[in-house]
Amino acid sequence: MTLIKSNLVNARLYPSSSKAAVFDGHGTVKPITNRQSPVLQRSVRLFDPTANMPAVQLFNESANSAKVAISSAAKPNSYQALTQQVLTDGFSRQLTYLRLSITDFCNFRCGYCLPNGYQGKRPKNELSLDEIKVLIQAFANVGTKKVRLTGGEPSIRKDVSDIIELVKATPGVETVAMTSNGYKLGKHIADWQQAGLDQLNISIDSFEPQVFKQMTGFDMLPQLLHDIDTLLESTDIKLKLNGILMEDTAYETLLSALEYVKTRPVTYRFIEFMQTSDNSDLFFAQHAQSDLITQYLLANGWRPHQRGHTDGPAIEYSHPDYVGRIGMIAPYAPHFCESCNRLRVSSLGKVHLCLFDQGNYDIRDYLQRQDVEGLMQVLHGFMPIKPEHHHLEQSNSGIMDNLSMIGG
């Protein structure tokens, strides 16, 4: 196999200057005139899920919040009818995948997310087990088949195994997954297996211990790799590793990942570096083209696989000489959002219709009142306003200051 050429190391999609240009998603670069998205105020005709008539809603989309006012009128749809309707947005996309953040706290200090570590105190009002039970039941009733627990770092929560078990026991949910930095992996492997965890994604941005320490703030890569091998040997949890595609480390990480998946049933996925309001300087210095990875794979005998209906956005590639796979998540690619099947809920009970949307929607009152049917109606009511796509190509990450807010 021919090694990838070293021009990968020198690749840069964005110029170093944060005011120079931006990729428009179609192979060209355009000048940037204004990086701050204006406050948008618009009139939205939203189907009122508690009534048999539409209700005109005026809401403010800003960098901080967006609220939907839902009137309480007329007679609601029947419970049976609601459970027979899979959430389907205005672009005919069926939303069968929920990403639930159970905390926004993270102990790592990754430069692309929380370079200065978690700021402030961890909230004391994260979703309780009882609230999560109502949430999962409502989502399962409207067609959710896969639930991924995210953070921050979800293993920070002492009841994470109880949450896994609760989700796994919910009728209709077929797959329970979790994304973690692996800090407590060795301690919890057996507990997570027993609780019913089906899939686990672990972040490994580099296979070089010193680079890993520099990127995360923790000198623990050898222990983490040992714990991963233990998981592979002792459980049937499906494992994937994630790494942010960074210009300075892309070449070495690709070679290491190829060696790693040669003999292990693991998918290593590169995630294209995404800009948020907190990481712009690093983003413009380190964003690398995902095409350089995929073109290499295709040129060297790797072949893409079709995504399943509950899969995330990654395109995975396999090779007959390798046990594992290499994957790519490229949010700046054209048509990336066309197959979106996801909704997100924050650790404080706010729905995000898109990772980079302009606002979020508070559903906590339904959780506290244990109103499963009411929440189902509201979820259906969100469908006409789920956006068609994000606006990352315009350097607009919406209200997403950093990815720990909702777990990416």
Image: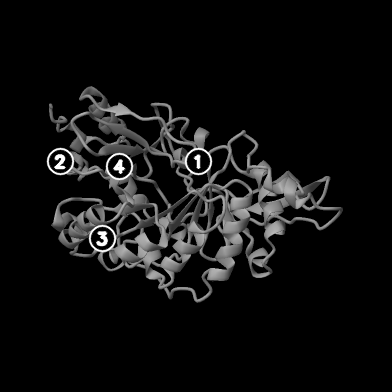
Residue 6 relative to residue 13: left or right: left
> Which residue bears the numbered disc 3?
216
In the rendered structure, which disc, 3 or 2, sits on the residue that comes first in sequence? 3
Mark 1 vs mark 2: which is more N-terminal?
2
What x and y, as percent, mark residue 171? Answer: 57, 54
Q: Is residue 144 left or right of residue 247?
A: right
Q: CA distance from mark 4 to mark 2?
A: 15 Å
Mark 1 vs mark 4, foreground winner is 4
Q: Which residue is mark 2?
A: 259
Mark 1 vs mark 3: which is more N-terminal? 3
Q: Check disc 2 and give the amino acid type.
A: Glu
Mark 3 neighbour density, 10 Å: few (under 14) some (14–19) many (20 or more): many
- Quarter of the image holding residue 210? bottom left
Q: Nearer the viewer, residue 19 or 58?
A: 58
**Going by the image, does 319 lie left or right of 179?**
left
Measured Cα–Cα span from mark 1 to mark 4: 21 Å
Residue tagged by mark 1? Answer: 391
* Few, some or many residues within 10 Å of mark 1 (<14, 14–19, 20+): some
The residue at which mark 4 appears reads as 270
